[in-house]
Amino acid sequence: MLVDRRDELGRARMQTVNRLHRLLLELFSGGAKKFLSAMQARALVATIKPRDVVGKTRRRLAVELIAELETIDKKIKAADRDLRELVIARGSTLLDLHGIGPSGAARLLADVGDIHRFAGRDRFASWNGTAPLDASSGDQQRHRLSRAGNRRINRTLHIMGVVQLRNPTAGRVYFDGKKAAGKTSMEAMRALKRRLSNVVYARMLVDQKRREAAGPGGHSGTTLQSSVTGLTPDTGPSDKPQPEPATRKPSLARATP
């Protein structure tokens, strides 16, 4: 429920920012930058003093939207704080992974549940929609993006990939390697999301094993070092289409990536 509420706040913020951008475009030549904070918007509006009635009305509405944006930002900050505490209390180390915040980690824990219900990382990828589908024709071997699977988890992995591409990470190196090998940006991103699915699966599996080892109600206080070494390109089956999730509970040895 809390992560759903956090998603609603995110959508409300986006709608408010979009309305504010439209007003600023009418108040200023060229409008404002794409990623605008409430503080930046308030400083920008303070520099203009329209004299006509229409201009004054636009400025007043902009100030009201900025106030709404500040309120939403406070609620988002509080929601992230609550989700972070719950994720840590669960004994999860997903927050150590680059590109996963409190909302993404909470969404993974809420939607995945018991990671052991997946026989392996390939089944997990099929469930979250990052396993590409075979679209070969004749001698031409190719795959296409899957539109199936859990779209909320798929979005979480997409955001994780976007954040990694903005920083000097192993994900960035992997993406650039795919591009150098002749993949399009879309194909490289699809491959990156598939690999990040492996990383998340492995981390959740380790967390689950540690919780089980700690016993009922126990949580280990140790945290794993953030690592995405699983992003290193290989010739494994990670880029191939995968079957649907398993319905039976596998052994821990079989589920290890």
Image (cartoon, grey):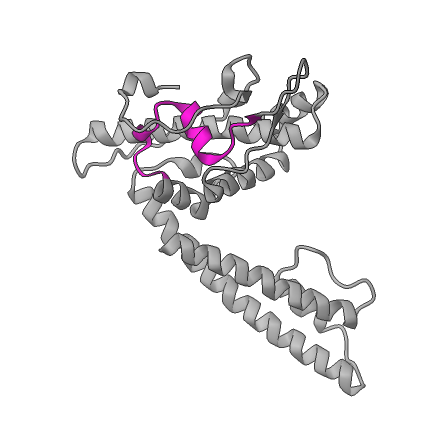
Q: Could you tell me which residue is drawn at 39 percent across and 45 percent down?
A: 106
- In the image, residue 116 lies at what x, y percent? 30, 28
**Vertical placement of 82 versus 101: above or below?**
below
Q: Could you tell me which residue is drawn at 32 percent across and 39 percent down?
A: 113
**Vertical placement of 209 versus 167: above or below?**
above
On screen, residue 171 versus residue 59, left or right, reads left
Judged from this view, the residue extending furthest toward the bottom is: 53
Quarter holding the C terminus is top left
In this orientation, which residue lies closer to the viewer: 243 or 4?
A: 243
- In the image, residue 28 lies at what x, y percent? 79, 69
Number of marks present in the image shown: 0
In this orientation, which residue lies closer to the viewer: 244 or 158?
A: 244
Task: Tell me, yes or no, whether the highlighted magenta stretch contains residue 127.
Answer: yes
Quarter holding the N terminus is bottom left
- In the image, residue 227 lies at what x, y percent? 47, 26
Q: Could you tell me which residue is drawn at 42 percent across and 24 percent down?
A: 121
Which quarter of the figure has residue 164? top right
Q: Could you tell me which residue is drawn at 54 percent across and 38 percent down?
A: 147
Q: Is residue 226 visible?
A: no
Which quarter of the figure has residue 208? top left
- In the image, residue 203 lies at what x, y percent? 39, 29
Judged from this view, the residue extending furthest toward the right is: 29
Judged from this view, the residue extending furthest toward the left is: 216
The magenta region covers 112-133
Task: Tell me, yes or no, whether the highlighted magenta stretch contains residue 70.
Answer: no
Q: Is residue 20 visible?
A: yes
